[in-house]
Amino acid sequence: MSNANAEKTGSIQNKNTSININKIEYGDVIDSLGKGIRDFRNDPKYGLAIGGIYAIGGWFLYALLMLLELPYLFYPLLAGFALVAPFLAAGFYEVSRRREREEELNWGHVFSAMRLCCGKDLAWMAVVTVFSLIVWVDFAVFIYLMFFGLQAISLPDLINAVLTTPSGALFFVIGNFFGAVFALTVFPLTVVSFPLLYDRDVDFVTAMIASVKSVVKNPKAMLIWLFIIGMSFIVSFMTLLVGLFFALPILGHATWHLYRKLIPDE
C-alpha cells in the first residue's frame, strides 16, 4: 500500500481478516442517502413490505401498552426500536447488494437473506442491541417514575403535560437528553457492524471495533448520519408510524451504501 493510501485508510487486524476504513465526507453521506432513495424507488415492494411490518408492529405495540395501562412506555420503546432495526434490515442490504452487482432479485433472495442472518454473528449483535434496548427502557421508566410516580397516565394526557406544565417539559427535556446520550453510546457500535457482518465472514467483536473506528475516523459525517436517522424517527412518530413505510427502507438501503463507502471491497 502506498503512503497516500495508508494515510487515507485505517486498518484493523485479527487472525481472520484485515478491514480498511476510508475517510468520508458530508457529501458521501448525502450520496448514500440518495442511493438509498434510488434503490427504494426502483424496488419499492420489498421496502414497503418490510417497512410495513415495522409500522404494523408499532401499532400493535401501542395497542398492547394501552391494554396493559403502560402508555408511557410507547415513546421510549419506539425510540429504542432503532437499536434493533439494523438487525432486521438484512432484506434491504440484499436488495442493494444485488442491484449493485446487477444480479437477479426476487422475494426468495430477500427472505433467505433475512433467515440466514440468524446463523451468523449477526445473532450475537442482536443480543447486544436487544440488551441495549432493555437498559434504555429501564432507564426511561426510572425517569418517568421520578416525575409522575406510579400513576398510569394516558399518552394524550402525557403529551398534554409535556406541552402545558413545567414538570412535563422538564421530563421531556431530561428524557430526550439522556436518550441522546444513550444513542451516542450505542450508535458507534452498530453503525456499520450489521452490514459488515452480513457481507463478510468476521466475528461480531471485530465488526463492532470496525464500526467504532469508522465513527472515530469520520466524526462529522457520522454525526450527520445520526441526525438523519433521528429526524426520520421524529417524522415517523409524528405521522403515527406511517412514515416507517418509507423511512426504514430508505435508511436500510442507505446504510448499505454508506458501509460500502466506509469499508472498501476485500
Image: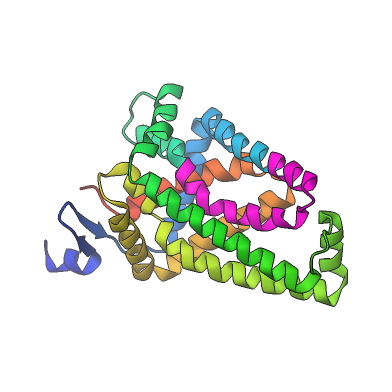
Name, please, the residue furthest toward the left. Answer: 1
Residue 33 % position (x, y): 49, 50
Residue at the (48%, 44%) spot, across then down: 252
Whole-percent x, y for residue 98 in the image: 36, 32
Residue 86 magenta: yes
Which residue is depicted at the point 33% across and 29% down? 102
Decide: is 107 above or below 150. Answer: above
Horizontal placement of 78 versus 161: left or right? left
- Above or below residue 17? Residue 67 is above
Viewport quadrant of the N terminus: bottom left
Q: 3 above or below 166?
A: above
- The image quarter in which residue 247 lies: top right
Where does residue 89 sit, x and y in percent of width and height?
47, 42
Coloring applied to the structure: rainbow
Look at the picture and state if 140 lies above or below 130.
below
Q: Image check: 169 left or right of 17?
A: right
Q: Does residue 34 appear in the picture of this structure? A: no
| Highlighted magenta segment, given as a residue range | 59-88
Q: Is residue 195 left or right of residue 43?
A: left
- Which of the 4 image quadrants contains residue 58? top right
Q: Residue at x 26, y 51 (%)?
A: 264
Q: Taken as a whole, is the magenta stretch helix, strand or loop?
A: helix
Asked if residue 167 lies left or right of residue 142, the reply is right
Residue 59 in sight: yes
